[in-house]
Image (tube, helix red, strand yellow):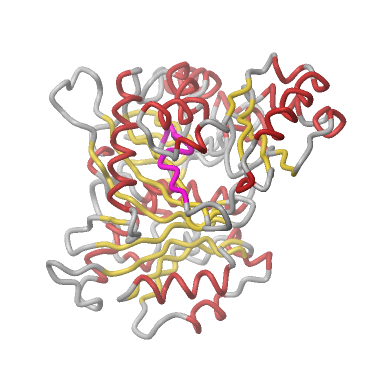
Amino acid sequence: MIELLPNLGAEEGEDWRGMKSQPAVRAAARLWALIHPRETRLHEQLGHEGADTMQERPTDRDALWPEALGPPVDGSACAGLTEIEGPVAWLATPTIFAQARSIFGAEPAGPAPAVVAALHDKAFAVEASEALDLAPRALQSLIEVLDPETLRHPATLAERLNARLRDWPEWTDRRFTLKPRQGSSGRGRVAGRDTIESGQLAGALPRLAARGGAIFEPWLDREADFSVIVDVPESSQAETLPLLVGSLEMLASESGVYRGHCGELDHRGRIFSGDPDDEALRAGAAAVAGLARSRGYFGPCGVDAFRSREHEGARPQLRGAVEFNARPTMGLVAIGLVRRALARVRAPLELEPGDRRAFALIQLDLHRGETVAALREALPDGAIWLDLAAPSAASGKRDTDEATTQPILVFARERAPLRAVIRQTLAC
């Protein structure tokens, strides 16, 4: 039996406990359960006061299974999930390890929290990018890793960073961002242009220090975001190379909030971003995963990247390792769900050997006025729409969370028209 402990957002420290009741977070946790074998239970109440006794009843995976995927199936959707048993956490932290020992008498599968914390730190991605030459050198020289102690002196830091800003090349437009070294979805950033005031930093620096420090770098307008998923074998399996699970384009808002993933699949269920830079992205991610493995990491992980927009004085720049996610990711979930649906969509899509078809996993935010009808009406002809809302275990009706959040999986014959619809209707 697999016991899923969905501490999504645990990068935020104890703040993640306030996120667990958000419909989008609950929907993501339930989708995560769907890619695991039938003998899986999701502990949705994790994080409540007194949760170390876990009095709530966990939800069996099949109770979350959407009708759109057909009858529930056995087995996992991804190879790296087949051997695990017992508790499995979204992110390995000391708190979740202590809870797992208390509830199940066993620690979660995967590397120790100290290993995860060191590699989940954005400073590791900066180091890996420089060591593996995964970003233009002109950009690498402008990125600075700041430790927590440095952030405790706003006036000194502002003077130092302003001196750096004055030396930045014109193509940066001297726009900057300070982002937390531990965090997700763009939360906790400080951004500005031309100059940094110590008063501007005073309120933000304690929060950044509590999140492990900050990364100071140019703010670049993103043209596209990417995620490459890799499964890293344990160091004892010396002859086994990291498995490249798939590459995707990540759908995000202008502020970096996750909205979904899109890409292409072939008739065997292999997943590609469909972007011209795909091969470079995959090669870079494999190299980063290898470096993480040398430092004790194993299990599923994600390497996030982006390409900036072309502007005066600089061509588009590919950053092949912006973040290393030392945990399962929504990219892994997207790949697993696409493979769950493959048998149902292969024939309607006329997906034959040598072909590729497009897909997108999207979390519609109905609270923001995004409507199902608007997206469905704009889809290309022949598109396949799968509603992944979880049924109520008792009544078979849609879960009440779906009043504000609706996860959908869409397939189409070509990527460009599908991507254009998503861009126009969801602004991401």
Quadrant housing residue 248: bottom left
Q: Nearer the viewer, residue 157 or 38?
A: 157
Q: Position of residue 336 (x, y in %)?
A: 32, 52
Residue 349 vs 208, above or below: the answer is: below
Q: Nearer the viewer, residue 115 or 137?
A: 137
* Bounds of the magenta segment: 317-327
Q: Nearer the viewer, residue 424 or 46?
A: 424
Q: Position of residue 353 (x, y in %)?
A: 12, 67
Q: Quadrant of the C terminus?
A: bottom right
Q: Position of residue 359 (x, y in %)?
A: 36, 66
Rendered residue at 67%/71% (across/down): 369
Residue 142 vs 343, above or below: the answer is: above
- Residue sitting at the far right: 199
Residue 294 vs 51, above or below: the answer is: above
Main SS, magenta residues: strand
Q: Position of residue 413 (x, y in %)?
A: 30, 76
Rendered residue at 69%/27% (across/down): 208
Q: Quadrant of the N terminus?
A: top left
- Residue sitting at the far top: 149
- Does 5 appear in magenta? no
Image-based side of 280 in relation to 192, left or right:
left
Image-based side of 392 in relation to 285, left or right:
right
Quadrant housing residue 231: top left
Q: Nearer the viewer, residue 100 or 235?
A: 235
